[in-house]
Image (cartoon, helix red, strand yellow):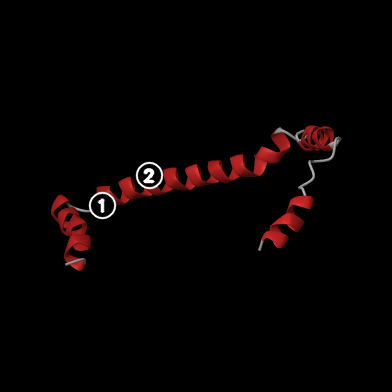
Amino acid sequence: MDDLEEQLRRYRPAGPPADLRARVVESARVAGAGGLREWLPAVAAALVAMLFYWMAANEGQRLAGYVSPAAQDEVMSLPTELTR
């Protein structure tokens, strides 16, 4: 066992290359050049989700105007009855 440990001591991990920091910083600078363009799909998806949420809320309010309050209470109690 000591022989194995002695052999392993000869192999030391090498450090990173000297120019690694410069390469990482350069690639981050080049990749970050897009900025706003990279965020546009995420912003568009969030806006579409908010639009659909707003449309659903408005439609729910519109439909609630057609339903009597007694029927509304009955509909709202359905989920609790179904989970029993």
- Residue type at mark 2: give it: Asn
Near-viewer residue (54 or 71): 54
Quadrant (top left, top right, bottom left, bottom right) of the N terminus:
bottom right
Rounded to the nearest whole Å, what is the CA distance between mark 2 and mark 1?
Answer: 13 Å
Near-viewer residue (62 or 34): 34
Near-viewer residue (79 or 25): 25
Tell me where residue 54 appears, x and y as whole percent. Answer: 43, 43
Q: Residue furthest front?
A: 2
Residue, x 83% and y 33% (percent of image)? 26
Q: Residue furthest right?
A: 19
Residue, x 49% and y 43% (percent of image)? 51
- Residue type at mark 1: give it: Tyr
Mark 2 neighbour density, 10 Å: few (under 14) some (14–19) many (20 or more): few
Tell me where residue 63 appears, x and y as whole percent. Answer: 31, 51
Quadrant (top left, top right, bottom left, bottom right) of the C terminus:
bottom left
Residue, x 21% and y 66% (percent of image)? 83
Q: Which mark is residue 27?
A: none
| Image position of 31 with respect to 56: above or below | above
Q: Secondary structure at mark 2?
A: helix
Mark 2 lies on residue: 58
Q: Secondary structure at mark 1?
A: helix
Count of marks, rendered view:
2
Q: Quadrant of residue 72?
A: bottom left
Mark 1 lies on residue: 66
Tell me where residue 56 appears, x and y as whole percent. Answer: 40, 49
Residue, x 37% and y 49% (percent of image)? 59
> Left of 40 or right of it: where is 62?
left
Q: Earlier in the sequence, mark 2 or mark 1?
A: 2
